[in-house]
């Protein structure tokens, strides 16, 4: 009886490749016992919140057949392959090119591939050259039998491909994805299985070396898994999808999309490769409306023009300017980011300051990035110190970049003056003498909840008076409030509003990331290291999930329920994976 061996478990995260919409899924989430997993080859195009529970990523089921019977299997993974194993032999799968999967077995067994049939039967076409075309969610797939004998069983409700071994016991087959009518290359032009593995390995190894070549010993075992998680969720411009630059999706499933403020954190986390970081930064400005707002929730073929996330891009730009050598970035690329950043900043003062007090407001919970924070009970439009702090740093960042690229010094000085004025407005409007608050700009109702995000204003660091810094840190680190063995809780454990939601009390990724930066900016690197160590140790133990229970440290995988894509659990997050690399490299 076979036992699975994992580089990563498909129950924790699907297996994919940078820039590819192919991914491998286990049909039984969380189940790895022999005979229970079922391997699926999936299409992740059009993923995320746009997909309903009736639409599945699992497009092609893969099974091993012996003497006409389906064999029980387990699913193993290496750094570069998925392996479907039975007691009688195995099949190995590799995404050899971004649009091409090759499958090989050498044990005299039959491979069965069962594509998902669309209502009404969909399109299945014998191309009369040995290849078959079938539906692959939003695209078409081309089945390529290189070695073995293909037999097809089809009806209006089902389609089964069986590929029996040749006389040497070999099955060798490919699946190629097409967004247009597929045209088969000469078979010898497809990369052989070994070449597929070598290509996958070379690309991933080069990426790992570029973004994080090593980590301190306690975190080194998780390094490649974290890098791989981010790498597999990267999207690339391919001439067909909307993406014009490299960007990073959050995770498979409900959050299968590119989110604006998550990109900003990715920029910092991946800044060891400054060209990649700048490419991601450039990408967020590809989807800017005429008022300057950056769109959110980008998919391969659409984006939500009404969705927005916090202006954290200025924090990312400031990080690059302060910590990286950007001399290799072309002038035109710097200029484009500068122009985009200026328009993004101006948007908030033009469109989101309804009472014209120089403090901007969010209009709904989704825009804040905190979604369910208790301080939202005072209603919207909601002004908060953290959101305005990001904008103050953004003004500084665009001033610094402006000087670097030759923008008029008076304009740059004006940005700096506005930043300083905004910092003072933040202090005057949100500091009550002992803690930070938020308020409704229409009703003036004040939120006094014990919510950690309000204290993210500490990212301003020494721009704040030392007394305010000290009182804020005392508030956060008071015994039994926010600091847990697993990191900082998003709501105080002593709060009447504490709950196990995203920002109602769980230990979530952006809180740890932002507060480590904020504590360092305030001169308390000791506390940043303590928060980072606790969170890193939690992730090392549980995996790269972006929510953890503040009382037990267990990964919160079930909170979304069966909402989209038929997924029961949340998967590992690139947000968390990249944060892991950054915190381990900087604060250990």
Image (cartoon, helix red, strand yellow):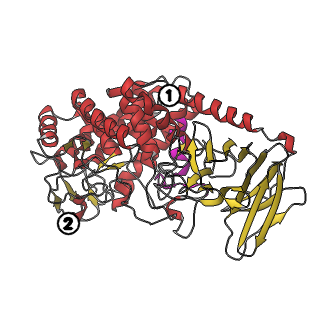
Query: Which picture quadrant has residue 342?
Result: top left
Q: Residue furthest left?
A: 433
SS state under label 1: loop
User: Residue 244 in the image: x percent, y percent?
Assistant: 61, 45
Check if mark 2's residue and mark 1's residue have beta carbons within 8 Å. no
Which residue is painted at 54% across and 39% down in the image? 231
Query: Which picture quadrant has residue 377?
Result: bottom left
Left or right: 135 as drawn, with respect to 29: right
Residue 398 in sight in this render: no
Image mark count: 2
Numbered disc in front, either 2 or 1: 2
- Residue 283 included in the magenta stretch of the image: yes
Please name the residue that numbered disc 1 is placed on. 405
SS state under label 2: loop
Which residue is painted at 49% across and 43% down in the image? 340
Q: Which mark is residue 488?
A: none
Please name the residue that numbered disc 2 is placed on. 443
Please give the range of residues in magenta. Answer: 278-301
User: Residue 401 in the image: x percent, y percent?
Assistant: 44, 31
User: Residue 396 in the image: x percent, y percent?
Assistant: 35, 35
Left or right: 38 as drawn, with respect to 377: right
Q: Nearer the viewer, residue 151 or 73?
A: 73
Q: Label 1 crowding class (10 Å Cα cut-off): few <14, some 14-19, many 20+? A: few
User: Residue 515 in the image: x percent, y percent?
Assistant: 28, 39
- Residue 469 included in the magenta stretch of the image: no
Which residue is painted at 88% across and 45% down in the image? 186
Residue 284 in sight in this render: yes
């Amino acid at each position: 009886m076979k036992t699975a061996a994992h580089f990563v478990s498909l129950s924790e995260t699907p297996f994919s490749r940078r820039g590819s919409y192919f991914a491998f899924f286990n049909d039984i989430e969380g189940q790895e016992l022999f005979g229970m997993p079922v391997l699926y080859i999936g299409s992740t195009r059009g993923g995320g919140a746009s997909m309903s529970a009736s639409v599945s990523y699992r497009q092609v089921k893969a099974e091993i057949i012996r003497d006409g019977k389906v064999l029980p299997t387990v699913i193993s993974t290496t750094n570069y392959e998925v392996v479907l194993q039975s007691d009688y032999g195995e099949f190995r799968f590799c995404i050899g090119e971004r649009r091409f999967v090759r499958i090989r077995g050498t044990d005299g067994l039959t491979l069965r591939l069962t594509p998902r049939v669309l209502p009404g039967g969909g399109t299945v076409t014998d191309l009369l050259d040995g290849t078959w075309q079938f539906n692959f969610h939003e695209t078409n797939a081309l089945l390529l039998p290189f070695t073995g004998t293909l037999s097809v069983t089809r009806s209006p409700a089902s389609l089964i491909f069986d590929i029996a071994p040749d006389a040497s016991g070999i099955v060798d087959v490919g699946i190629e994805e097409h967004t247009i009518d597929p045209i088969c290359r000469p078979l010898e032009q497809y990369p052989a299985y070994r070449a597929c593995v070598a290509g996958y390995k070379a690309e991933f190894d080069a990426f790992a070396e570029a973004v994080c070549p090593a980590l301190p010993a306690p975190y080194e075992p998780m390094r490649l898994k974290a890098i791989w998680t981010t790498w597999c969720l990267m999207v690339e411009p391919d001439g067909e999808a909307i993406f014009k630059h490299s960007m990073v999706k959050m995770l498979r499933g409900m959050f299968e999309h590119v989110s604006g403020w998550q990109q900003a954190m990715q920029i910092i986390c991946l800044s060891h490769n400054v060209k990649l970081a700048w490419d991601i930064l450039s990408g967020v400005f590809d989807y800017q409306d005429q008022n300057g707002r950056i769109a959110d929730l980008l998919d391969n073929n659409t984006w939500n023009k009404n969705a927005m996330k916090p202006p954290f891009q200025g924090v990312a730009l400031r990080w690059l300017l302060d910590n990286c050598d950007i001399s290799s970035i072309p002038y035109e690329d710097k200029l484009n980011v500068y122009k985009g950043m200026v328009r993004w900043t101006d948007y908030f003062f033009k469109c989101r300051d309804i009472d014209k007090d120089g403090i901007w407001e969010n209009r709904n919970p989704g825009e804040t990035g905190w979604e369910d924070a208790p301080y939202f009970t005072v209603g919207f439009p909601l002004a908060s110190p953290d959101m305005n702090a990001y904008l103050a740093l953004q003004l500084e960042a665009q001033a610094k970049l402006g000087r670097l690229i030759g923008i008029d010094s008076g304009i740059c000085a004006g940005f700096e003056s506005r930043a300083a004025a905004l910092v003072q407005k933040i202090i005057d409007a949100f500091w009550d003498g002992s803690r930070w608050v938020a308020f409704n700009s229409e009703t003036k109702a004040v939120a006094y909840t014990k919510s950690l995000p309000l204290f993210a204003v500490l990212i301003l660091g020494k721009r704040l008076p030392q007394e305010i810094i000290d009182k804020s840190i005392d508030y956060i680190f008071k015994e039994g409030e926010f600091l847990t063995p697993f990191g900082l809780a998003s709501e105080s454990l002593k709060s009447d509003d504490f709950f196990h939601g995203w920002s109602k009390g769980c230990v979530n990724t952006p809180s740890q990331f932002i507060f480590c930066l904020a504590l360092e900016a305030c001169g308390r690197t000791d506390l940043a290291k303590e928060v980072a160590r606790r969170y890193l140790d939690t992730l090392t133990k549980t995996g790269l999930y972006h929510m953890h229970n503040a009382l037990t440290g267990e990964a919160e995988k079930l909170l979304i329920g069966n909402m989209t894509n038929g997924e029961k659990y949340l998967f590992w997050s690139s947000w968390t994976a990249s944060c892991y690399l950054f915190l381990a490299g900087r604060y250990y």
